[in-house]
Amino acid sequence: MNSKQLLFFCLWALLPLALWAQSPDASSRHPKREFRGAWIQTVNGQFKGMPTEKVQQTLVNQLNALQQAGINAILFQVRPEADALYASRLEPWSRYLTGVQGQAPNPYWDPLQFMIDECHKRGMELHAWINPYRVRNSAQNQLAPNHIYNIHPEWFVAYGNQLFFDPALPESRKHICLVVADIVTRYDVDGIHIDDYFYPYPKPGVEFDDDASYARYGKDFANKADWRRNNVNLLIHELHATIREAKPWVKFGVSPFGIYRNQSSDPLGSRTNGLQNYDDLYADVLHWARQEWVDYTIPQIYWEIGHPRADYDTLVRWWALHSENRPLFIGQSVDNTVTHADPEDPNINQLPRKMALQRMFQSIQGSCQWYAGAVVENKGNYRDALAQEYHKYPSLIPVFDFMDDEAPKKVRKLKPVWMEDGYILCWTEPKYRHEMQRAVRYVVYRFANKEDVDLDDPSHIVAITNVPFYKLPYEDGETKYRYVVTALDRMWNESKAVSKKVKL
C-alpha cells in the first residue's frame, strides 16, 4: 500500500468518529447559517417567447414560493449559449428569452437586473450562472449576425450537433473573461456561477477535434488529457482573477459533475463507477479549490442512496473529506429524491436521510436544489418539507471569511415610529469606511419581554431585509417585546446587536 492509499484509508476509518461528533442537535436541525440555493435554468425554454409581463410574473411567483421554502440564494442562468438574458455589450440577446437570438425583448426589460432587485428585496443572494464554452446546443439553432462565432469562426469546434469555444485558445479565454467582467462591473451580483459543462460530455465514437490546437499549444505536455485539463485550469484561474479585480466581494462558484474520479482510476477517488470530471470533462475541480481559484463548490450529487454506480451516501462522504478548505454545498435532485424510497423505510422518500447526512459534516455548509421549478411545483411535497422542517426558520448564508471577516458597525437610531402604513421599527444605516464593510442587509429578531436574547437561535428571526425598517405586527399595545436588529455586510458578517422594547 503506497502513502496516498494509506492516507485515504486512515481518513475513511476516522469518518465514523467525525459523524458521531456531528450527531444531530438543535443547531444542526435548524442551523442559523446555511447556504440554501436553487437553480433557475433558462436553457430548458421555460421563458422562451413569453411576453415580458408574463415572464416577470412567473419569476416573481417562483421567488415567492422559493422564499416560502427557505431558499436564500438563486443561481439564475443568464448565458446559456454565448448569448445573454441581460443587456450585454458583447453578446446577443438569448433565444431562450425572446425566441430569436439577437432580438431584444419588447417591451424592453433586463432579466438579470430584475432578478437582482427581486432577490435582494427578499434577502436572497443572486448568482449569475453562465456556461463558459457552450455556443450552440443544436445545429438547427440560428446564430445572430453579431454572435461571436460569426465574427471569429476560427475560435470554435463543432462536436456532434453542438458548437463550443476551443478551450485551448487564449482568445476564447479572453472573450469569456470579458463577458464576466462586463456582468460583474455593471450588475450588483453576489456571485458568478458555472456548472458542469467544460469540455463536452463525451459521445461514443466522436472525437473533439482539437488536434491543430494541440500541435500549436501542447508541446509542453506529455499527453492531450493533461493539456486539456491545463486549458480549463487557465480559464478558471483567469476568471477568478477577473472577478476579484472587478469586485472583491463577488463569489466565484462551480457546480461540477458529482464524481471527481472513481477509485479504479485513483486510490483517492470515490467508490463509484461513472463518468469522471478529471478524466472525461478535463475538470480538475480539487486543484481549483486547492489553488483558491474557486470560492465554493456544489457537486451535483443527483443520484439516490443505494445507486449501484454512484451511491449518494458514498459521494456525500467523499466530498465532505475533499472540500479543500472551501465552502462545500451539495447539489440535490428534487425529482430523484422524491421518487426513491428510504432504504430502511419504504413509506417515506429519501429527503430525511439525505438532509441528515448532509448536516452531519462540518465541511458541508448547505445545499442547492435542482431544479427550482420542482421545488415550486412541490413535487412529492418537497417544498412543504423544506418549509415545515428542514428550512423551518430563516438562515444566513455562511461567512466566506477567507474573502472578508470584518463585521459592519451596528445600526444607529433604532426606534419605533407611527406612520401611515402602521407601526414601523426604523433604524439608520451604520457608517462604513469601505464597500466591503457597508451594510447591505439587516436581520430583525424578536424576543418575549423577559426572554434571554439568543442570536444563535434562528427561530427568533422575523426578517432578513435590505431596507432599514420593519413593519411591526401591532395589536392592542398591551404586550411587550424586545426587537433586536443587526447589520450584514456583503459577505454576511453580522454586526453587534442593537435592541428596543416595544409594546404591541
Image: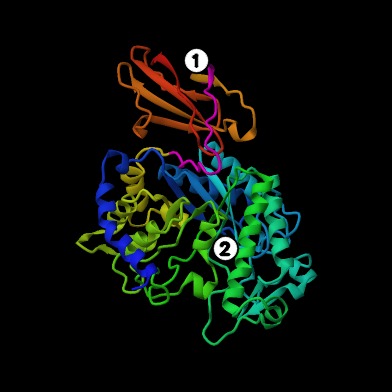
Q: Which mark identifies residue 44? A: none
How many neighbours does mark 2 have within 10 angstroms: few (below 14), some (14-19), or many (20 or more)? few
Q: Position of residue 340 (x, y in %)?
A: 30, 64
Q: Is residue 79 visible in this depiction of the protein?
A: no
Q: Residue at x 64, y 31 (%)?
A: 434
Magenta span contains residue 351 = no
Q: Which residue is mark 1?
A: 415
What residue sits 61% from the left and 23% below the top?
431
Where is residue 107 drawn, in percent x and y? 70, 49
Left/right of residue 148 with respect to residue 236 in the rendered view: right
Question: Is residue 410 located in the magenta-colored stretch of the structure?
Answer: yes
Above or below residue 248? Residue 497 is: above
Residue ranking furthest to the bottom: 205
- 470 w.r.t. 62: above or below: above
Report the magenta residues as a range: 396-423
Q: Amino acid at mark 2?
A: Gly
Which residue carries the number 2 mark? 45
Which is more foreground, mark 1 or mark 2?
Answer: 1
Quadrant of the image containing the C terminus: top left
Q: How is the image coloured?
A: rainbow
Would residue 439 be seen by someone viewing this image from the given angle? yes
Secondary structure found at label 2 = loop
In terms of secondary structure, what is the magenta stretch mainly?
A: loop
* Left or right position of 315 against 38: left
- Which residue is at 60% across, 35% downward? 436
For marks 1 and 2 on the same chain, the one whose residue lies earlier in the sequence: 2
Q: Is residue 429 left or right of residue 72?
A: right
In the picture, measured across the screen, residue 270 lies left or right of residue 100, that is left
Residue 53 placed where, x, y %?
Answer: 61, 48
Q: Is residue 470 above or below residue 141?
A: above
Q: Residues within 10 Å of mark 1 (few under 14, many from 20)?
A: some
Question: 294 or 186, which lies in front?
Answer: 294
